Amino acid sequence: MAYPKGAYVLHQGALYEALEESQGKQPDQHPDAWRALPPPADEARLSAGSPHQGLGVRWPPP
């Protein structure tokens, strides 16, 4: 598979960004073609004034 410059991939649990067009280069073995990124946030918090406050899944249930 070919990846364009700027593409994001998840490889062996780690996130990478393509620094150039890449095909057949594993991100963990080609730092010249891929930049390792920090893990993405796994939660999002709403601001106090958000119209979405109170919506969504709640745990424990009421």
Image (tube, rainbow, N blue to C red):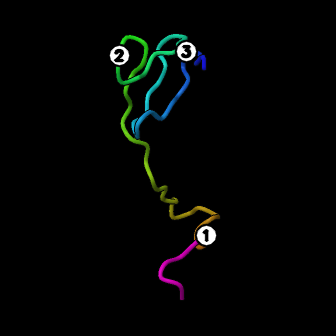
x and y percentages locating residue 22 in the rendered image: 52, 13
Give the extent of the magenta segment: 55-62
Q: Which residue is mark 1?
A: 56
Q: Is residue 62 above or below residue 26?
A: below
Q: Looking at the image, which is closer to me, 17 or 29? A: 29
Pick the residue in front: 18 or 24: 24
Relative to the observer, which residue lies in front, 49 or 27?
27
Counting from the top left corner in percent of width and height, residue 32 is at 37, 11
Residue corresponding to mark 3: 5
Residue under label 2: 31
Q: Amino acid type of disc 3?
A: Lys
**Of circles 3 and 1, which is in front?**
3
Vertical order, 49 against 5 (above or below): below
Picture quadrant of residue 49: bottom right
Q: CA–CA distance between discs 3 and 1? A: 36 Å
Q: Residue at x 39, y 36 (%)?
A: 14
